[in-house]
Image: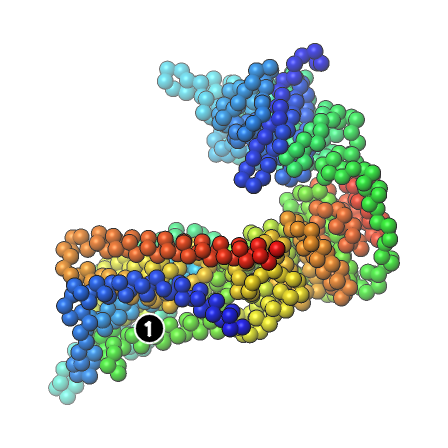
Amino acid sequence: MDARKKLDKRLIDRQLFWPLFALVVLLTFDFFYIKGFFHIEIIDGHLYGSLIDIVNRATPLMFMAIGMTLVIASGGIDISVGSVLAISGAITAIMIGGDMVFVDGVPKYAAHNPMSVAILVALIASVVSGLWNGLLIAKLGVNAMVGTLILLVAGRGIAQLIVNGNVITVYYEPFFYIGSGFFLGLPFSIYLVAAFLALVMWLVKKTAFGLFLESIGSNRVSSRFTGLDVQTVTWACYAISGLCAGIAGIIIASEVKSADANSAGLFIELDAILSVVLGGNSMAGGRFSIIGSVIGALVVQTLTTTIYAIGVPPEVTMVVKALVVIVIYLVQSQMGKTSLKAAGGATALKAKEAKA
Amino acid sequence: MGTRDPLLKMLGVCKEFPGVKALNHVDFELRHGEIHAVCGENGAGKSTLIKVLTGVEIHDSGEIILEGRPIRPRTPMEAPALGISTVYQEVNLCPNLSVAENIFVGREPMRGGKIDWDDVNRRSAEALARLNVKLDVTARLDEYSVAIQQMVAIARALDISAKILVLDEPTSSLNKTEVANLFRVMRKLKSAGIGIIFITHFLEQVYEITDRITILRNGQLVGQFETASLDRLQLIAKMIGKDLEEFEKGIKESLSDTASAETEGVYYRATQLGQLGSINPFDISIGKGEVMGLAGLLGSGRTESARVIFGIDAPDSGDVSVNGESVSIRKPADAIRLGFGFCSENRKTEGIVANLTIRENIVLALQGKRGLLAFLTRKEQEEIADKYVKLLNIVTPSIEQLVGNLSGGNQQKVLLARWLATDPELLILDEPTRGIDIGAKAEVQKLVLQLSGEGKAVLLISSELDEMVRCCSRMAVYKDKHKIGELRNKEISELNVMKTIAGGLN
């Protein structure tokens, strides 16, 4: 029994080792090359510093990485998340809006609609977006890349329609708390991610969802023949991915106090996919680690922050980022391959022994 | 005929794919004006032989001699230039082009830098007229039936070159009149001196049209026979590799006491169950404690029947009852809810989930039955997995081993364990012992008998007749997508199965 648990532990460790390793290498680099990178100070009871900043900025990406992990595990991909993010931000911004009113002669801002209603509508719209993707891919069998490409293109148009092509500024103080407020000294959005992560981990580990998903992503046909509801599970993954993008959209709108349908979440789907891959997950589906993807999101954000901080000229930031990603990915996959081979050899040997 | 050299000779042809000897020193001979059948079970090497001849695959060693001249086609384009044309099972023409365009696509006659459409249409009509087919050659191909499309494919093949025509399963999607029509054309071509290689799994047709038969088995040549001198029983015996004497000897000596099955009552009953295109409507009943066998050659419809029963292919006709109650089974989940289990013949693609552990594979069907929320705890999962690993002697260092790392026999046992864990009332086993070693085979067979002893119904499909004879208390025999008969108790013997397939019984 103990030996069995140890074996499990080692498997998990192996998948999480490389993303953590990449993170540590990046942070070590930052430690030596960026002055005061690890400096954290307390202002007004809030923690401030580059590290806090990275985690805070990474929260939208972490959300999307969680959803993307499930979709990729099911054997698909969701490239519409950036557009869903824009839709969600646009709905929230336009519904809250904010007018200046005078209460007892003091100027105050009031929301057009209650904030809770605005957020609820935005989240519903996001889930509906995900369900639409699921309809195309899980139900009608459209290729995942093509199916979500439709919403990638159309979604941004829908977001533009919602805000009528304008950048909508929000004037409503309580809304800003989501993206830039502090709770117990830490940015509020970190708690949001933690809570959501706990919820998804419960779904994956404490219900059969994780087992079904890994089975379906590994072998769709076998899973159907075994009586699993392949369609519904796949569909749920896209719905959750839509929800994640929606939450990310609200956080970003709150952080920048506005909704820009044109540029909000532009190309963020690529960062989300990158987070999943750097988290040690296979694009082929099947086995997955959500924690790995969350660490992957931190790696991506740390890399972005580092590139800005060391003063790489803006024209070449993308190139530098791409180069670093290639290096990290190659190191991971090479090591992964060799360690896999070693493990495979060991099992083959054991099998031989057993036969003999 | 005898004085002339044979049209085509293939001598000692070998072709090896990674891990498989697809052709092992195969000889083949085709005469002028001959229709020659190539017979064998799936995987016998029929397709590879044709592919080597038509340049799709290049043989490793051996000689191909066409009219006394050695040839070595290296691409599918070279063979037609040499005079060898092929019409495949799936008509591979362009449905959205006209009939004439299809016949001349890729070799359009030009005049003054432009395609000479008058010439194309005239020559197309002529080519079809030679086959006694009259069509509007300017109409789109998909306006015509599959049978006509096949004629167009043959017209194209003959117009390109006319020495050897290879017909690969040309009749599988044709009805009786269409087949008769095709045969008329084949006889006409034969009298024109063209050699025809005819591949089919319909034995009737072999006897109706061919002059000689070449039989392959496991990539080896069994022999070349005059059709008239080889009776059906011998043909089947040679295809599956048993000698007649061996059959007679192998007849079950002691049969289990009769009527053990029916007394306990019928568990599953289907009437006129069928699915268009895969299996013709059939009746079947399976009793509690009974091992029902589905016998027949590969492609005869036995696997298709099992798939329709389990709901993998939704039936489009028929009524099904379980324990006397009428039920509807449209998908595997329906069947599993009723207590069915199904081990597919394609263990790797339709059975195990290679990337999951033994434990996860074993609990998968049970968990699927319990649903999302009633998740088995880790401890329960381990107990179930441990139980079946022990019960079925699955050889592994740990239940956390990935199933993909196990040997074929152990993978099969994991698959069996998955269904046993659901405590099934009816277990469908399609080729449960294929590709596993003798020891594991015996264990699986023992398990089948044990299950029936516990009052479970078992539906068994196996290409190994002796295994079927040993295990089954009743047997349905399939041929050409029809259930053609049933054998019970004392009637069950390898010989009787052969006879039924050959049309000697019932």
Disc 1 element = helix
Residue occupying image coordinates x 75% and y 50%? B467
Furthest residue toward left: A105
**Residue B153: image location, x then y, percent:** 56, 28
Displayed quadrant of residue A115: bottom left
Inspect this view and state whether residue B391 appears.
yes
Q: Which quadrant, please, contains the N terminus of chain B?
A: top right
Q: Which residue is mark 1?
A: A193
Q: Decide which of A150, B482 is in the foreground and name it.
A: B482
When the figure is inspected, residue A316 is found, relative to residue B124, above or below; the finding is below
Residue occupying image coordinates x 68% and y 21%? B34
Residue occupying image coordinates x 59% and y 64%? B362
Q: Which quadrant, please, contains the C terminus of chain B?
A: top right
Of all chains, the one bearing label 1 is A
**Callout 1, which amino acid?**
Val
**Residue B8: image location, x then y, percent:** 62, 20
Displayed quadrant of residue B197: top right
- Decide if residue B480 is on the left or right side of residue B377: right
Displayed quadrant of residue A81: bottom left
